[in-house]
Amino acid sequence: MTSTWSNSIEKNLFLISKLPDSLQGKLIKAFQQHYEELYEPEATAYLQDAIDDILTAFQSNDPKLTHLRYVWMALIFAVVVEPTVKYYQPDNSVPKATINRVAIWLIETLAELLDSKVKFNEASREIEANVIVNHLLTKKDTNFQVLFEALNVYKSVVKSLDANQSLEALLDILDDSLEGYAIFPGSQGRRELFDWWLLEVVPASWYLFSPSYIYCVNKSTHSKQIASCQISELNQISNLMWSLIRESYKNRRNTNKDKDINQQFLKSTSEHHEDKIKSYLQIPPNQFMINEYENIC
């Protein structure tokens, strides 16, 4: 196992080491292989097969929870792709409108999962999502590959809100981002971008966290500032979702409604993640509770 994988395991111990064994196995296998699609001459596997295997292992026993995770991963890419659109079309409102709409969907959907009494107007949400898609489809100046693929990501992000289309939409997002030019053009940095998805985005998406960093092929100060703002935006949305989870846990504990819930208590040997989880959950040390998502509703 390479030092890059070991370093990522150490940095993200709390997240990666507690993923299901099947998912961990797929991540390790995908990391150890090489892909022609990522411009690696020593290619040993097909990239699409690796992605399919990971997203299949990413599924849980609860389809609603799997859908929520897919949409959160899609939103991460919506945030990461935004600078591409803004570079070519600074006044384009599609990225921000999509991000806001999907963030609201995530909060509302999670609230419904945590409390069956909470219901939102699904028809209204679908209408708003369709408005965004229709706006995307009216764009005429997208012959340029970079811009076309970036805008296509947002179309796919909105489509991911439909449970029946979420997996296909996410595959399209990954195609436009990992192989395509939605995040950056050219061949440089393709393997590193894929590794970022493997080691950062997949584990973070499982727990509805933000990745700890955004991969930038351009190491300029400006690019790092943009990446910092992106992480901040994702953290804000993640914190909102975790505030709902934390409140639900407290309510169930206080009312004894969680007796049949199989709780999973996780400990982290990483000081970084220990502080991170404390701030999210605000509960005593050594009691880092993440509800077993399959029983969340």
Image (cartoon, rainbow, N blue to C red):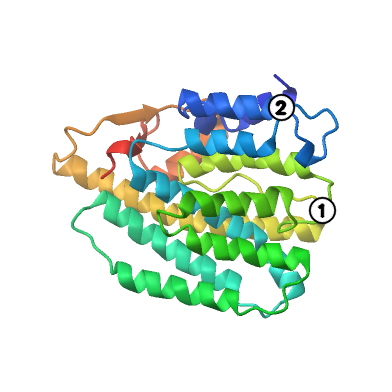
Residue 139's quadrant in the figure?
A: bottom right
Of the numbered discs in the image, which one, if any, rests on residue 273? none
Q: Which amino acid does label 1 sit on?
A: Asn
Q: Residue at x 60, y 55 (%)?
A: 77
The percent position of residue 128, horizontal first and vertical second, equals: 42, 74
The percent position of residue 287, horizontal first and vertical second, equals: 36, 31
Compared to residue 22, the image places residue 39 above or below, namely below
Relative to 22, is 175 on the left or the right? right
Viewer-closest of 203 and 10: 203
Compared to residue 63, the image places residue 30 above or below, namely above
The percent position of residue 263, horizontal first and vertical second, equals: 29, 31
Q: Mark 2 points at which residue?
A: 33
Q: Quadrant of the C terminus?
A: top left
Q: Mark 1 points at which residue?
A: 218
Relative to 160, is 287 on the left or the right? left
- Secondary structure beneath disc 1? loop
Any part of residue 199 in sight:
no
Q: Residue at x 60, y 80 (%)?
A: 138
Any part of residue 71 in sight:
yes
Q: What residue type is labelled 2?
A: Gln
**Mark 2, other Cα within 10 Å: few <14 / some 14–19 / many ≥20:** some
Q: Which badge, 1 or 2, is on the more N-terminal residue? A: 2
The reply to whether callout 1 and callout 2 are in contact (CB within 8 Å) is no
What is the number of callouts on the image?
2
Compared to residue 71, the image places residue 125 above or below, namely below
The percent position of residue 269, horizontal first and vertical second, equals: 52, 25
- Secondary structure beneath disc 2? loop
Q: Which residue is drawn at 20% across and 43% down?
A: 252
